[in-house]
Image (tube, rainbow, N blue to C red):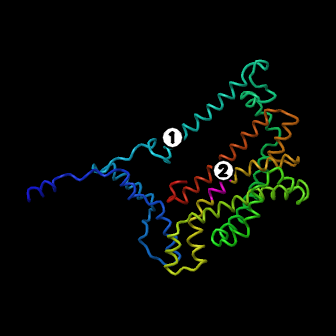
């Protein structure tokens, strides 16, 4: 019997799979527990100072050093895993290159031989050649006017939408009361909403454009805030209640801190959409802005400026989103999905 037991003891332990190890070392929600402890006391030990991301990195290092732990599979064999930054840039650049090639292919050659007429779609070369004339049209002032209107409208919508969304997500009777109004605003087409703001706010002035952005964005910010509050795990609320936290403390120190990353993600998307909405409002009147320049170029020419202005709007939206996303990832390092 002793010899049999020795043989069993000498038998090597089965090699741990990466899946089992990853399930132990990854804790995507544990960093949020720090907000719960702030509601009822200073009880430490719930998460390390580095947050759950440190757990995951330590597990990957252990998997590479310990021969009994299998290495994680490469990123292209995992579901819902981001590729490395260079590969993301490569894939994005390749897609842009494909679109640009198709654009060049259907617009190259002599005017009579093109697949698409230049009156419908200018060629990339013609758009680039028109950049010099854009400087004569006060492009900087138009960009400033557009961004100012978008910023005022989105910030106002954020203040109102997030505040009401937190209340509605925490107190469901508030959600029931505001639900019909929000559904109405979300269902109204943008063209009809523009006409409504023209009637309510007296013409095509600055107030009308700002309120148009506000009414177009605020119902989506409200709904996204409710969703962000709703997906906070219930165990954090129960822990705060066990520690003696009041309803206000639970909202202020548990629900809001854990929902902020998703709320900021919503605001990032809404800012990009607002840049598209404002061009519709600005095209209704000749009072400056990128939308007014697009409308003037469409009517009076050059047509190449229409395409060029669309690229400018896209670059502005991408740049702002990149800055906000970088700041968001730096502020919420424990959220690896941002």
* Residue on which disc 1 sits: 86
Q: Is residue 29 above or below residue 64?
A: below
Secondary structure of residue under mark 1:
helix
Location of the N terminus by quadrant is: bottom left
What's the residue at 47%, 59% (across, down)?
Answer: 28
- Please tell me in which quadrant of the rendered image residue 330 appears: bottom right
* Image coords of residue 59 (percent x, y): 37, 55
Give the mark, 2 or 1, whose residue is nearer the N terminus: 1
Q: Residues within 10 Å of mark 2 (few under 14, many from 20)?
A: some
Q: Are marks 2 and 1 in contact (CB under 8 Å)?
A: no
In the rendered image, the residue lying farthest to the front is 1
Location of the C terminus by quadrant is: bottom right
* Residue on which disc 2 sits: 320
Query: Bounds of the magenta span?
Result: 264-269
Q: Is residue 114 above or below residue 17?
A: above
In the foreground, 105 or 89: 105
Secondary structure of residue under mark 2:
helix
* Image coords of residue 204 (percent x, y): 89, 53
Q: Does the magenta-highlighted stretch encompass residue 326?
A: no
In the foreground, 24 or 303: 24
Q: Main secondary structure of the magenta part?
A: helix
Answer with left or right where residue 76 lies relative to residue 262: left
């Amino acid at each position: 019997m002793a010899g049999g037991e020795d043989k069993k003891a000498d038998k090597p332990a089965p090699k741990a799979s990466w899946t089992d190890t990853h399930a132990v070392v990854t804790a995507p929600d544990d960093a949020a527990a720090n907000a719960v402890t702030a509601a009822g006391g200073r009880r430490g030990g719930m998460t390390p100072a580095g947050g759950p991301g440190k757990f995951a990195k330590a597990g990957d290092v252990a998997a590479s050093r310990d021969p009994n732990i299998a290495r994680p599979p490469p990123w292209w064999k995992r579901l819902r895993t981001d590729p490395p930054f260079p590969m993301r840039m490569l894939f994005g650049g390749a897609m842009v290159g494909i679109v640009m090639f198709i654009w060049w292919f259907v617009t190259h050659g002599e005017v009579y031989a093109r697949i698409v007429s230049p009156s419908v779609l200018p060629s990339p070369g013609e758009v680039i050649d028109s950049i010099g004339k854009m400087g004569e049209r006060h492009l900087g002032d138009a960009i400033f006017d557009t961004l100012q209107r978008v910023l005022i409208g989105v910030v106002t919508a954020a203040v109102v939408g997030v505040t009401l969304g937190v209340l509605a997500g925490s107190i469901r009777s508030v959600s029931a009361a505001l639900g019909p109004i929000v559904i109405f605003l979300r269902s109204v087409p943008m063209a009809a909403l523009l006409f409504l703001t023209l009637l309510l706010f007296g013409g095509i002035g600055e107030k009308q454009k700002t309120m148009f952005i506000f009414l177009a964005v605020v119902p989506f910010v409200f709904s996204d805030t409710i969703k962000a509050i709703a997906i906070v795990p219930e165990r954090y609320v129960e822990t705060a209640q066990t520690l003696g936290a009041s309803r206000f403390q639970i909202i202020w120190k548990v629900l809001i801190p854990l929902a902020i990353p998703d709320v900021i993600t919503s605001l990032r998307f809404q800012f990009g959409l607002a840049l598209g909405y404002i061009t519709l409002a600005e095209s209704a009147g000749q009072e400056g802005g990128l939308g007014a320049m697009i409308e003037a170029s469409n009517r009076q020419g050059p047509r190449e400026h229409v395409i060029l202005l669309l690229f400018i709007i896209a670059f502005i939206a991408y740049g702002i989103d990149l800055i906000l996303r970088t700041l968001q990832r730096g502020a919420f390092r424990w959220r690896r999905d941002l």
